[in-house]
Image (cartoon, rainbow, N blue to C red):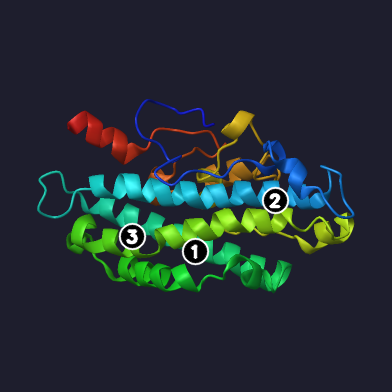
Amino acid sequence: MTMRPSDAPWADGPFPLIATPSKRSDLSIWLTGSSHNPDHFHVRAATGMAHAHNGIIRGLNAIILQAPNVPSKNDERYRPKDVKDLLSFVRSWIKMVNHHHAVEETYIFPEMAKFSGGTSLFQDGMDRLLACVTATRPHEYRWAGGMKEVVDSFSKHLTVHLYAEIDVFLGFGYLDSEDFRQRLGMLSDVFPCVYGCSDRTYEGGNLFPMLHWTIPYLIKYYFAVGKGAWRFNPSDWWCKPRPLLFVLRAEVEG
């Protein structure tokens, strides 16, 4: 459960977030074979992966909820900077998703795609979205009849994939815990999107992403300086939920 920052819609929907594996009531069914230990690294890995996937889902939800409220050229409230920042946020989100899957399937478990259905069902759509937000100029932007159709073409497939992979990780209890830990080296080179789409209040609290305490300060005062795209993040640099700016603005102006 998320501690919502306001009564307005937030990034825990429309696509639901993933329940934290270590807190699932059905966890016992996954503790089979050689490992009956809930501290086995496959449970911790699944939990960390769920937090990462929830960041992706929050980013997608933040786009779906806010993009319709960013005025296009024919609206008197139109501001080119708002559109530029939205397009930049979407590009960063796509980069985060692509980076996540590249690391996951290339360096952690090369055969992960075989277990979880691969990325082909949504990758083409994400590639089209990247081409769209890269080529679109602010005065050309529109949600309905434009970006919305591209997002709708892959978002369901993407989220189904993200949900399914958690059960895949929970099924790795037969692996040696230490070997599994060494194989799971996650990288985070898109810090502003990773932190801004995480929620450390989710389901009673968590520590994801587990990086040095100085990272939020580096993001705030170095990585994110002068980049308005991060206005679309659903959380602040300390991974605490905050109101979605363009949902809040639409409610005030509506």
Task: Determine which quarter of the picture holds residue 1.
Answer: top right
Nearer the observer: mark 1 or 3; the answer is: 3
Q: Residue at x 34, y 60 (%)?
A: 151
CB under 8 Å between callouts 1 and 3?
A: no
Disc 3 marks which residue?
152
Task: Determine which quarter of the picture holds residue 202.
Answer: top right
Horizontal arrangement in the rendering, residue 111 relative to residue 88 (left or right): right
**Percent x, y for residue 125?**
39, 69
**Percent x, y for residue 24?**
67, 38
**Label 1: element kind:** helix
Q: Earlier in the sequence, mark 2 or mark 3?
A: 2
Inter-mark Cα distance, 1 to 3: 18 Å
Inter-mark Cα distance, 2 to 3: 27 Å
Disc 2 marks which residue?
46
Q: Residues within 10 Å of mark 1 (few under 14, many from 20)?
A: some
Horizontal arrangement in the rendering, residue 164 relative to residue 241 (left or right): right
Q: Quadrant of the C terminus?
A: top left
Badge 2 amino acid: Ala
